[in-house]
Image (spheres, helix red, strand yellow):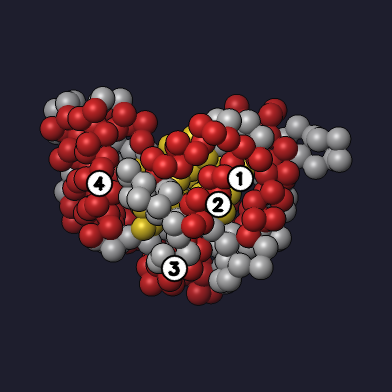
Amino acid sequence: MSAGFGARLAASVAARGPLCAGIDPHPGLIESWGLPLDVSGLERFALNAAEVLGSTASIVKPQSAFFEAFGPGGVAVLERVIDTVHDAGALVLLDVKRGDIGSTMAAYTAAYVAEKAAFTADAATVSPYLGFGSLDAAVASAREAGNGLFVLARTSNPEAHALQRARLEDGRTVAQSVVDAAAEHNAGMEPHGDVGVVVGATVAPGEVDLTRLNGPVLAPGFGAQGATVADLHALFGPGLPGVLPASSRDLLRHGPDSGALRRAAQRVADQLAGTRESGH
Ligand SMILES: O=c1ccn([C@@H]2O[C@H](COP(=O)(O)O)[C@@H](O)[C@H]2O)c(=O)[nH]1
């Protein structure tokens, strides 16, 4: 078994900074790159983005939905994107947001993050909204394979407020209970555990307490959804400890020119690295 996901992620972030670069081949973006809206256009778009972003960011997050939308041919492109990102030196977080009863989660885990998984991602996003316990077997087999999971806690979209800020009988919010359950899985792991959470960069400061998490935090909503570096500071504190700010459209709009896309990603990576060095 290779080093655990938490350790591999820490090493990659130490080398390249915390930017999580997203590959979301929106139809409008594929067309804006002058490419046809078919599997050949998807392939050129996604492999170009994978080469460039995979050599700049510590972790790259392909959004599976945009590949699935093209059918089996699109899923085959997704497989090649994962290999291309790995060849370029970054980790792969596959954004699939799977959630189901435990026995079905075992099949999703076999697809994405278990030993000899069909897709060779380093981590995948999962939903705890069938009960956090439905993810227990997935956590165990991802960990056994040296891979990780990111559990949706407090997502970046405005529609999530009512559900995720609702209070349980013990007074905690639903989102906080997800963070606390992830923390239990990460307790005692070094440098940190392999069960991350998703907390949108658009969320109001103070809503979730991450102090006991001991795991990574994926923060989408940075860039195209409006959150800024200042918002990241306000929400997560100085130095952004363990936080992976995620940006997709706001980077990809700089293509198809590889140099322009690379410079855009490097600019954001430098901005975030400066944040960590100066601690503000
Ligand atoms: O709370 C969440 C969880 C996941 N996402 C995903 O992240 C990217 C965001 O794309 P942008 O273009 O940077 O807005 C996308 O794949 C979402 O499905 C999220 O936005 N919020």
The residue that appears at 80% across and 35% down in the rendered structure is 167
Residue located farthest toward the bottom when viewing the structure as drawn:
277
Instruction: Nearest to the eye among marks 3 and 2: give it.
Output: 2
Q: How many marks?
A: 4
Q: What separation in Å lies between label 3 and label 1 (alpha carbons)? A: 20 Å
* Of residues 140 and 172, the one drawn nearer to the viewer in this rendering: 140
Disc 4 to disc 2: CB gap under 8 Å: no
Q: Along the horizontal axis of the image, is 196 left or right of 167?
A: left
Question: Which element is circle 2 on?
Answer: helix
Disc 1 to disc 2: CB gap under 8 Å: yes
* Residue 28 visible in the displayed image: no
Q: Which mark is residue 136?
A: 1
Amino acid bearing label 2: Ala
Residue named by callout 3 = 3
Residue named by callout 2 = 140
Q: What separation in Å lies between label 1 and label 4 (alpha carbons)? A: 28 Å
Where residue 235 sits in the image (x, y, percent)? 63, 53
